[in-house]
Image: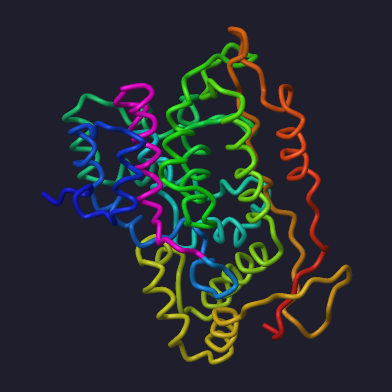
Amino acid sequence: MNNHFENLNETIKEYFNILSDEIPDFLNDYINTPEMQKQAGISVTCGTFYSKLFNNEIWYSSLDHSVAVALIIWNFTKDKKQTLSGLFHDISTPAFKHCIDFLNGDYEKQESTEELTTKIIKNSKEIMDLLNRDGIKVEEIDDYHIYPIADNDTPQLSSDRLEYTLSNGMGVVKKLWTLDEIKEIYQNIEIQKNENGIQELGFKDKEIAKKFVKNMRMLSITYILNKTKLSMQFLADIIKKMAERNIINKNDLYQLSEKEIINMIENNKDKKISECYRYWKNATIIHESDVFVEDKYCVSINAKKRYINPLVKQDNKYIRISQLSNTAKQDIDSILNFEPKKYAYIDFKF
């Protein structure tokens, strides 16, 4: 059987070793199922990896993210069911990830594909055989929202939110910290109790929490820049147009890798689609405007604002960093108050 952890890029391997110094034996079996392996062909960057508008240093797949979330949960809980719920939380992610939420009109929550999770698990002979072997019911692992260490509501810190903040800051989206800095942050985290008496990941040290929030702010603003929103909407519109012309269907988004779909985009008979895609792929700037611009690909989108206001241990109490640090509060407020120009456009009509 393929050992997923032996074949990793060295940076990702070191990062995974920080997240958990123990790889549980059962995890590799589930990672090797066809449904999980399909996630290896999907980038967590929602398609932005493929344009010169962005400077992504590391290819990091939806599978990498899912495995990392599972390792974080295992590190803090040593609970097999919670760990598997983290592994499976993005099993229904299609190519270009949240771009398909844009296609479905779900800009604000970006959860429109999650409803397929149970169906994909139940339809997988390999996963069901493993669950039966391990005496685990589908309803114990198909919804990571039921485990607060795995997932919780913004602005709390969960394994999912922690993972994409660490990996995106490792160079997947921006190079903001080294592996040593990630280790310092990660080793400062423990399970705490929040204001509602519910378990949540939190920091032992205020200064380290402040460093985490500072880089989280830079990432969170990147997610809602006009070039990011335009790119996600553009890829969604390309998929929509190809579907209207029967070049692609919804099932392809769940069966094919992004590279296979990009090959279909660049080589299909509709030259308008392939030419516009190549223009976006090679673009280095987009334009912004307060008013709609005619005869251009021009969009206006209110996208989800992702941010974290973590707990910090203070005198045997657990308090949000925004209540302990003006600097951290300003960082969080800068995300909430960030408003780019209303419209973004690129120099073609699609």
Give the residue furthest to the left. 1
For the image shown, how many numbered marks are present on the structure? 0
Instruction: Decide which of 326, 231 is in the foreground and name it.
Output: 326
Q: Which of the 4 quarters of the picture holds residue 330?
A: top right
Q: Position of residue 50 (x, y in %)?
A: 49, 72
> Which stretch is magenta?
56-83
Q: Which of the 4 quarters of the picture holds residue 339?
A: bottom right
At 40% from the left and 61% from the top, the residue drawn is 59
Q: Which of the 4 quarters of the picture holds residue 232?
A: bottom right
Reply yes or no: does residue 242 show up in magenta: no
Reply yes or no: does residue 57 show up in magenta: yes
Instruction: Decide which of 307, 304 is in the foreground and name it.
Output: 307
User: In the rendered view, does 190 fall on the left or right side of 6?
Assistant: right
Q: Main secondary structure of the magenta part?
A: helix
User: In the rendered view, does 211 fall on the left or right side of 116?
Assistant: right
Location of the C terminus by quadrant is bottom right
At 79% from the left and 71% from the top, the residue drawn is 288
Q: Position of residue 124 (x, y in %)?
A: 26, 46
Q: Is residue 323 above or below residue 226?
A: above
Q: Is residue 201 above or below residue 233?
A: above
Give the residue furthest to the right. 291
Q: Position of residue 153 (x, y in %)?
A: 61, 31
Q: Position of residue 237 (x, y in %)?
A: 61, 72
Q: What colouring style does the render use?
A: rainbow
User: In the rendered view, does 317 fall on the left or right side of 342?
Assistant: left
Q: Is residue 230 above or below residue 131?
A: below
At 73% from the left and 45% from the top, the residue drawn is 335
At 64% from the left and 66% from the top, the residue drawn is 233
Q: Is residue 274 above or below residue 129?
A: below
Instruction: Decide which of 42, 127 is in the foreground and name it.
Output: 42
